[in-house]
Image: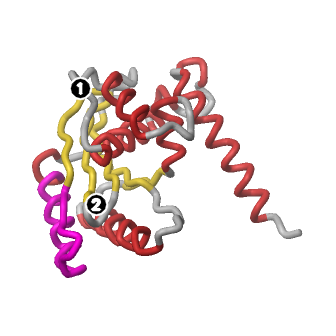
Amino acid sequence: MSTVRVLGIDPGLTRCGVGVVDVAPDRTAALVHVGVVRSPADGDPGERLAMIARGIREVLDAHAPDVVAVERVFAQHNVASVMGTAQASGVALMLAAERGLPTATHTPSEVKAAITGYGSADKSQVQHMVQRVLRLAAPPTPADAADALAIALCHAWRSGGAAAPGSSASQTPAQRAWADAEKRSRVTRTYLRTPR
């Protein structure tokens, strides 16, 4: 299996994190690009989405990823924030589909568990681990950028041959923690769907 290039996207309407990494079969990773696409909070919603789309297109054109991974939107107390995040996520997934690129979504807890070994890690812990994994001189900032890189790494480690389910002996401790968290999540989802 050859190196895979993953574009990770932390969707947001004001700040949309984008990060591209190359991940080898042995799970070592190298930074290709990281940044944040911004739009003004007081702008027209349609124009803001167009700005996000332009920024993501530029990254797709410049770095030609093999796959696009997007953070899965989940319900929060701030409905307006969730709506903007969901809209930006939809734009990202559509742009990837237009190019025939495979896509995946990962929940924040899945990403945190993959990177830090702890599904409830805070932003600074994720930034620190991304810095270590990619051998960067400093943690990537802002947090949206670090989250995008974490999403890309999570997807590569999850889908890579060396990190396939059932190969726990060859996984890092963080990857094993992520796999355990995923199994618990599947059990919970099955339980919630079972008629009572």
Question: Who comes first in sequence, dot 1 or dot 2?
Answer: 2
Q: Main secondary structure of the magenta part?
A: helix
Q: Position of residue 42 (x, y in %)?
A: 21, 75
Give the quarter of the image for residue 136: top left
Q: Residue at image x 19%, y 35%?
A: 32
Mark 2: amino acid: Ala
Q: Residue furthest top?
A: 169
Drawn side of residue 168 relative to residue 104, left or right: right
Disc 1 versus disc 2: distance between alpha carbons?
A: 30 Å
Q: Nearer the viewer, residue 172 or 119?
A: 119
Q: Residue at image x 41%, y 74%?
A: 80
Mark 2 crowd level (few <14, some 14–19, many ≥20, 10 Å Cα): many
Mark 1 crowd level (few <14, some 14–19, many ≥20, 10 Å Cα): few
Residue to which mark 2 is pinned: 96
**On screen, 133 above or below 72?**
above
At numbered mark 1, what does the secondary structure look like: helix, strand or loop? loop
At numbered mark 2, what does the secondary structure look like: helix, strand or loop? helix
